[in-house]
Image (cartoon, rainbow, N blue to C red):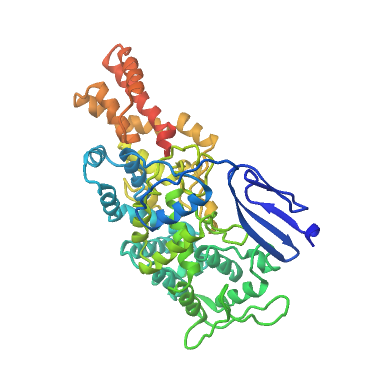
């Protein structure tokens, strides 16, 4: 059936494959996943291209932990040499933005860079993990995936009160560093009123059995089973039996109005779902596993126990991949919620190791984040070498990532000394603190804040676009904050020389001093200013230019 099959390559730049004949041709150095499909049968294999005559000498690199060992092993197969370690200035900016979603202060920058301790990077990671800002950032990330947002004001809706209580419940779980599998287990088996037991809002926000089934699989297992609702998945293992067997765990979720007309009580009752082909009640079946034996418990509790138990690699690998993606801008499986045969992990051994460590750590997110941020791999420079200039998926260099909407707005407020104000939050609250996915601003919407209408990881838009550039250049967000914050006026009042003010602005925004070329150009511009008032305007222009620079808008 070879001539009747369909063939695809995940990377035509390295390996192209004729869609009808299946004949593949190697091109540039790299790898590609080659897939053949006939009717309902799918097979695939990863292939690596090493050019003839390639000169390669394996570098002598000392892994800082297990992450580096697995990354180095893969890079050796590809004959890729990783980039050098980044500077202290780049590292502190990167790790602050990634762990707490803020920039270091000038004093924090100075202390870190001047510290001779060879373990100072590890110590900084430990310090940042204990800040409440770490909690706030990760509450926001999981609130996106759980779709915490208002949907209306009736008992069937997630009201603002419900959304806020749900958000605060999640914040409490993460702030206390509760094992993540326990958080998910409680969420998926929650019963009671949506006000008294906020986790039940997960079943209030989505009441369609099929959609709820798909959401649980996508968020907590990283797999999309939507196709299997009507037919066996054409590109993956999932069948209609799998789909309806898993859906049967949610058929007995019942809802009724509480004493408060806006409250809803979630409880377990009866109910079945029929397989559309056999017209028989579907048997509760663990996804990718087998039929469930449910004795002395509810279907939901049985499913929640199975999903979050230490032996379930689906859960541990998926959460580990979500965490990894946050720090690298790309998952080991990417998108993180689309695990399938035709979208394999770029480094299966690394993903397995992260999942095992996460389980070994009793699902402690902080410990896994520490492993990631203290690895050599995380600390690599963005500057490519000859061997890794085209590599985008094997973590041989650091990626350049645009700051997400909330973090960008928070850092603008931070460096311009202009507190944010959002509905329902006190003056000075951070954008990452906004509980309701339906509460936004023009700035946050323009820069891709998730609406939380779906569980898809694609909800957060990270791609730069023209609207964003125009808003920063011509809108009032940057210019008005510079004027309102009076950062420059305060330094002028304190008798700071213009040259020192420029250095301060660079440190606040880019976490470095201006280089010789920049100093020369800026000093020349300042020298042409006729009076102190004109100098102040020039300094404001410099501040504005820094806040519009790619170096500021991106983490690198």
Frontmost residue, 181 versus 160: 181
Q: Quadrant of the N terminus?
A: bottom right
Q: Residue at x 48, y 69 (%)?
A: 313
Frontmost residue, 188 versus 482: 188
Residue 55 in the image: state x and y as whole percent. 52, 40
In this view, which residue lies farthest toward the bottom? 296
Q: Residue at x 26, y 16 (%)?
A: 532
Residue 83 in the image: state x and y as whole percent. 43, 41
Residue 239 in the image: state x and y as whole percent. 66, 71
Q: Quadrant of the C terminus?
A: top left
Frontmost residue, 106 versus 150: 106
Residue 482: quarter of image: top left
- Work out whether residue 194 can be spotted: no
Q: Is residue 323 above or below residue 193?
A: above
Residue 150 in the image: state x and y as whole percent. 48, 58
Q: Is residue 221 above or below residue 416?
A: below
Residue 241: quarter of image: bottom right
Count of all numbered marks drawn on residues in the image: 0
Q: Is residue 281 above or below residue 521?
A: below
Frontmost residue, 179 versus 88: 88
Left or right of residue 456: residue 518: left
Left or right of residue 5: residue 125: left
- Work out whether residue 38 can be spotted: yes
Q: Is residue 370 above or below residue 39?
A: above
Q: Residue at x 40, y 35 (%)?
A: 552
In this view, which residue lies farthest toward the left? 494
């Amino acid at each position: 059936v070879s001539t009747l099959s369909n063939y695809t390559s995940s990377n035509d730049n390295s390996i192209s494959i004729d869609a009808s004949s299946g004949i593949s041709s190697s091109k540039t150095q790299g790898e590609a996943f080659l897939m053949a499909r006939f009717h309902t049968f799918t097979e695939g294999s990863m292939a690596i291209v090493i050019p003839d005559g390639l000169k390669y000498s394996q570098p002598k690199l000392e892994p800082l932990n297990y992450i580096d060992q697995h990354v180095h092993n893969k890079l050796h197969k590809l004959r890729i040499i990783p980039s050098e370690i980044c500077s202290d200035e780049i590292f502190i900016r990167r790790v602050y933005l990634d762990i707490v979603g803020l920039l270091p202060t000038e004093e924090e920058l100075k202390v870190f860079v001047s510290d001779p301790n060879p373990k100072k990077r590890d110590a900084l990671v430990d310090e940042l993990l204990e800040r409440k800002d770490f909690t706030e950032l990760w509450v926001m990330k999981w609130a996106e995936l759980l779709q915490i947002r208002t949907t209306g004001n009736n008992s069937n809706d997630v009201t603002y009160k419900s959304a806020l209580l749900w958000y605060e419940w999640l914040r409490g779980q993460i702030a206390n560093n509760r094992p993540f599998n326990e958080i998910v287990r409680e969420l998926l088996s929650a019963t009671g009123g949506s006000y008294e037991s906020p986790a039940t809002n997960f079943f209030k926000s989505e009441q369609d059995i099929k959609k709820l089934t798909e959401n649980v699989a996508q968020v907590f297992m990283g797999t999309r089973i939507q196709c299997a609702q009507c037919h066996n998945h054409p590109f993956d293992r999932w069948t209609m039996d799998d789909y309806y067997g898993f859906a049967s765990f949610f058929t007995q979720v019942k809802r009724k109005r509480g004493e408060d007309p806006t409250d809803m009580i979630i409880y377990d009752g009866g109910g079945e779902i029929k397989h559309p082909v056999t017209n028989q009640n579907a048997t509760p079946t663990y996804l990718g596993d087998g039929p469930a034996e449910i004795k002395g418990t509810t279907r939901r509790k049985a499913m929640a126990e199975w999903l979050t138990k230490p032996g379930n690699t689906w859960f541990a690998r998926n959460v580990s991949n979500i965490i990894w993606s946050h720090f690298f801008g790309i998952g080991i499986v990417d998108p993180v919620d689309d695990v399938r045969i035709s979208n394999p992990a770029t480094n299966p051994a690394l993903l397995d190791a992260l999942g095992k460590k996460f389980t070994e750590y009793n699902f402690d997110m902080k410990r896994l984040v520490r492993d990631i941020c203290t690895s050599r791999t995380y600390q690599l420079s963005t500057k490519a070498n000859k061997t890794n200039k085209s590599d985008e998926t094997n973590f041989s260099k650091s990626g350049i990532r645009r700051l997400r909407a909330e973090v960008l707005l928070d850092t603008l407020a931070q460096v311009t000394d202009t507190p944010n104000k959002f509905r329902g939050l006190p003056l000075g609250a951070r954008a990452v603190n906004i509980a309701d996915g339906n509460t936004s601003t023009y700035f946050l919407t323009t820069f891709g804040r998730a609406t939380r209408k779906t569980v898809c990881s694609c909800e957060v838009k990270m791609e730069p676009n023209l609207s964003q550039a125009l808003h920063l250049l011509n809108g009032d967000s940057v210019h008005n904050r510079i004027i309102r914050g009076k950062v420059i006026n305060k330094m002028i009042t304190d008798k700071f020389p213009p040259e020192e003010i420029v250095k301060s602005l660079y440190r606040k925004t880019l976490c470095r001093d201006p280089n010789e070329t920049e100093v020369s150009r800026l000093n020349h511009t300042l020298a042409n200013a006729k009076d102190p008032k004109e100098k102040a305007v020039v300094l404001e222009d410099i501040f504005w230019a820094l806040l519009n620079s790619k170096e500021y808008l991106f983490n690198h």
